[in-house]
Amino acid sequence: MLYLFPRRYEDRTSLTPIAQAQLGQYQVVRGRVIVQAGRKTWYTHKHVQEVIIDDGTGRMFCVWFNQPYLTAYFKTGREVIFYGKVDVYKNRLQMVSPEYEFLEEGEENNLSVGRIVPIYPLTRGMGQRYLRKVIFYALEHHVDELRDILPVALRNQHRIVNIKRSIKNIHFPETQELQESAIWRISFEEFFLFQIAVRKRRMSIIQKEGVAHEINAEMIEKFSQLFSFALTGAQKRCISEMASDMQKKTPMLRLLQGDVGAGKTIVAFWGCVVAFLNGKQSAIMAPTGILAQQHYEKIQNFLKSRWLKKMRVALLTSNITSKEREKVYADIKSGKVDLVIGTHALLNETLNFVNLSYVVIDEQHKFGVRQRAILSAKGQNPDCLVMTATPIPRTLNITLYGDLDVSILDEMPRNRGKIMTKWYPLEEAGMVYENVKKLVEKGEQAYIVYPLIEESEKVDLKAAQKMFKHLQKNEFKGLSMGMIHGQMKKEDALKVMQKFQKGQLQILVATSILEVGIDVPQANVIVIEHADRFGLSQLHQLRGRVGRGIKDAHCFLIANPVTEESQRRVETLCATTDGFKIAEQDLLIRGPGHYFGRHQHGLSELRFANPLTQMDILELARTEALGLIHQDPELKEESHRVLKEVIEQRYPTYLAMTAAA
């Protein structure tokens, strides 16, 4: 309970009188219910709950949609505190879907009014007032049991407030200064612990002996000549950085990040060539069978050169038969395969390599640290390249990938077409389909993408399938169409995809299965339906499916965004095609916790710390963590033992993998 931190605070030391409420601002008001009514709108049949409150200075309307159960709560005469954005509608002050908290008759609970009040994340059936009481009780009876894990010398040096006072002031601060001091302390501790864990992991890996590959200038020159186009300066720089790492005995740990279509596969393939020329094996792990298949086909084209004709490549996905899988396993174990490209199937316990010296993990955010370590453990501390098409701002690089060196592909290949992005409201979808039909009749191929949101996946999929049939019979009658989605059999999805790649289908209707890595250079049109339901990085990934050839491409967004956030996402995508700018915006809109999925990256431990807004604290915590690890790598000193215990409890998976990796 002590570490269930508030998600925000409300300053109720002086509530805003309704008469002084400022338009467009989020504010806290307190009033008594004078009218409440529920009704249905005649045009959408949505339930609308309206409540009018009065605080003696003025009146305000509060409105909720599709929450009919609220009728039972807002009894006339009840005193309520509301938090929300103040707007004007039909000449009246209004809050739409505000948060609310009821105050009992005559109650002046000092935990809920007249102070800076914590607002906690809630679960169903539990209210703010009840949770506050429970946490206040826990503080009164148990805060003295807390032990301070930060070393005394560190606390003294930076005048860091002790943990007992900090935890009290995180929950119930008496002043804003005490609240800010407590937030600084808790954030510093979270950053500090995570950076120690990250550093310990890196040290445990680089202290091991890996494979020192032999590389010379002639190899790099020959590799550059494999392709019918000139490599970009960024590709050459990244290849050079990898070459430098792969020549050393310590294992390479490198993150390759680049925008959609920046040519990451070629850079990753360089490591496979180095391993092959040194008589070793390599592996590429992709998140989907379709992406693994594409890597396989792309690399087969690279092998047409006499220089690499003897390089043997195998594909290992869940689509192949058990008999084929057994043969691939046997060939890998006997050394008949030089490079294996696959999905999670590569993590199978029964798969063994002879001399795996180089590993590529594609789309890192689809895998966790554990998977990276399991694959690496199949070799003798192999060099490891982690790839991502989601550009990561420096703030998150330090936090998430402190155990990796970073290479950035920030240059697009020459002769790439531009992508023109336009946004249309749902009412104008017919105009979009008309444009798509004209482009397809001129020889283009098009994607039409529908969102599948987990909570309503079945409903979404039915809607997408229904729309597919509608478009076949109406707007795109006479055109060849196909559909793929995540619930299809993998072999069926692959067949449809191959038909589209060969140009046998003009239009491919798909769910967000398209997000990762589909590469059809001749497809130059994409329609993203209900674009407001996708995340910004996801939208950018989807748009990256077109514009992969020399011709200009078209991206049509169909959306009626209802929130400010969803509108910002759509506007940002129309304004820029720069993945790094989009990543920064995505972080600002969503915050770091949702950027990759917390469970895989230790971000679940950053309950309060935010790399975006607290870069100065992160930098200080990182510097102190590096200094401590340099001084006492195993945390054996008496004053560091508590630190070691807490880190092992907090990051068991992360640190347990160090031995395997």
Image (tube, helix red, strand yellow):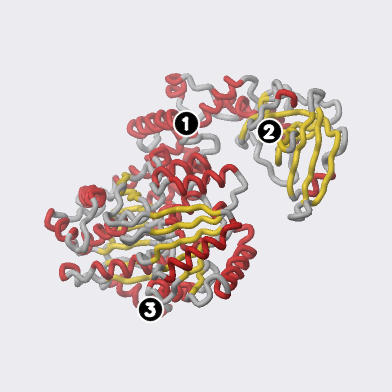
Regarding residue 630, the answer to whether it shows in the image is yes
Rendered-image quadrant of the N terminus:
top right
Residue at image position (63%, 34%) is: 6
- Tally the numbered discs: 3
Foreground mark, 2 or 1, reads 2
Q: Which SS class for mark 2?
A: strand
Q: Which mark is residue 324?
A: 3
Q: Amino acid at mark 1?
A: Gln
Determine whether label 2 and label 3 are within 8 Å by CB: no
Task: Find residue 326 and report its image quarter.
Answer: bottom left
Q: Amino acid at mark 2?
A: Val
Q: Which residue corresponds to mark 2?
A: 86
Q: Position of residue 156 (x, y in %)?
A: 45, 19
Determine whether label 3 and label 1 are within 8 Å by CB: no
Task: Find residue 332 and report its image quarter.
Answer: bottom left
| Distance between the alpha carbons at the discs numbered 2 and 3 | 64 Å
Q: Position of residue 449 (x, y in %)?
A: 51, 62
Left/right placement of residue 5 relative to residue 605 reads: right
